[in-house]
Amino acid sequence: MSEKRTFSISELSQEFDVTTRSIRFYEDQGLLKPKRKGQTRIFSTKDRVRLKLILRGKRMGFSLAETKELFDLWDETPTGNEKQLKKMLKILEEKRAQLEQQKNDIAQAEMEMETAEARCREALAELQKKKQVMGLTEAPEEVEET
């Protein structure tokens, strides 16, 4: 009989570079369900995989509620089903649309920055030109005063 691998909260914390507080928060939200031995949490391989999926989902823009919904669907039917796959596709579609909007917003912001930068450079060049002209006309006056 093979023994299943288990993990402590500190092992998962180090492996995934997250705080133990974050892991406890995910547990409080129902995303992780470690067993307990007294006050000690004992995480299974399933919990480890779920933590990895939670963190990947966060990077992709999934909310914890969306991740929990997907986990709940998976818990209902571990082999996967049409409802679960449709939900995942819907969320991915929404995330893709959000990313596309962010790309457009970034492109617009870059164009506005380029325009502002060009205006600043032109204004600076004009100021420097005026200073040179004024410097030339003021220089003899300053020399006369000395």
Image (cartoon, grey):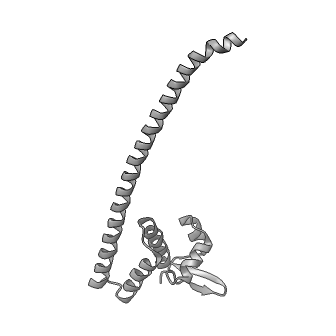
Q: Quadrant of the C terminus?
A: top right
- Point out residue 15 in the picture as x, y percentages from the top left corner: 55, 65
Q: Which residue lies furthest to the bottom in this view?
A: 76
In percent of the image, x 28 and y 79: which residue is there? 86
Q: Nearer the viewer, residue 101 or 78?
A: 101
- Compared across the picture, whether 66 is left or right of 84 comes to right
Q: Nearer the viewer, residue 51 or 90?
A: 90
Q: Nearer the viewer, residue 110 or 17?
A: 110
- Point out residue 95 in the picture as x, y percentages from the top left corner: 36, 68
In percent of the image, x 63 and y 86: which residue is there? 37
In percent of the image, x 48 and y 29: which residue is there? 126
Give residue 93's quadrant in the image: bottom left
- Point out residue 26 in the picture as x, y percentages from the top left corner: 54, 78
Q: Give the vertical position of 136 relative to 79 (above or below).
A: above
Q: Which of 100 and 48 is in front in this view?
A: 100
- Compared across the picture, whether 58 is left or right of 27 comes to left
Give residue 132's quadrant in the image: top right
Q: Give the vertical position of 44 relative to 107 (above or below).
A: below
- Point out residue 90 in the picture as x, y percentages from the top left corner: 30, 76
Q: Give the vertical position of 51 relative to 59 (above or below).
A: below
Give residue 70's quadrant in the image: bottom left
